Amino acid sequence: MNQLFTHLALFSGFAILFLFCKTENSCRELTGRWTNHEGQVFSFQPDGKALWLIKFGSQYDSFPFTYRYDCATKIPTLDLMNFKSGPLVGKTLFGIVEWSSDSVFRFDAEPGTSSDARPASFNAEHAERYFRE
């Protein structure tokens, strides 16, 4: 009986620890500069404004936009919208985020007019890794 109680207590403790760690890892701080090491940089400000820098040769083009980050969902979402210039003016990128650590996340998005355009899972061809600068 004692052995059964011990095993049950250990199992419950590990299950609670696993659930706690899983919840904590799903929501991380997004503000700051992030790079994919291939010429793209996101600079997220805490007020919902951001800048997308794309390197062409030795110069950068910058595209201001706003964003909405929601980590309360099963898969955290990141929507990029209100682009002031560039090919995404008038469009929204509905995206999902997966955190590897505090300094690395994977982002996958599709353009659309409603959140139905949001990917349901990560596509290896479209998803990009971003690293905190």
Image: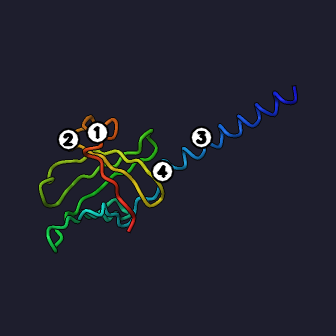
Residue 19 location, quadrant: top right
Instruction: Using the image, determine if residue 92 lies above or below residue 51.
Output: above
Q: Which mark is residue 19?
A: 3
Towards the viewer: 71 or 8: 8
Q: Amino acid at mark 1?
A: Arg
Q: Nearer the viewer, mark 4 or mark 3?
A: 3
Instruction: Using the image, determine if residue 55 lies above or below residue 128.
Output: below
Q: Which mark is residue 112?
A: 2
Among the two numbered marks 4 and 3 on one chain, the one whose residue lies closer to the N terminus? 3
Q: Position of residue 91 (x, y in %)?
A: 17, 48
Among the two numbered marks 4 and 2 on one chain, the one whose residue lies closer to the N terminus? 4
At a point 45% along the width and 59% down the height, the residue shown is 29
At a point 60% along the width and 44% down the height, the residue shown is 20
Q: Amino acid at mark 4?
A: Cys
- Residue that badge 4 annotates: 27
Residue that lies at the very extreme toward the right in this rendered image = 2
Q: Secondary structure at mark 4?
A: loop
Among the two numbered marks 1 and 2 on one chain, the one whose residue lies closer to the N terminus? 2
Q: Are marks 1 and 4 in contact (CB under 8 Å)?
A: no
- Residue that badge 1 annotates: 118
Q: Amino acid at mark 2?
A: Gly
Q: Position of residue 80 (x, y in %)?
A: 27, 52
Q: Secondary structure at mark 1?
A: loop
Q: Quadrant of the C terminus?
A: bottom left
Residue that lies at the very extreme toward the top in this rendered image = 1
Q: Amino acid at mark 3?
A: Leu
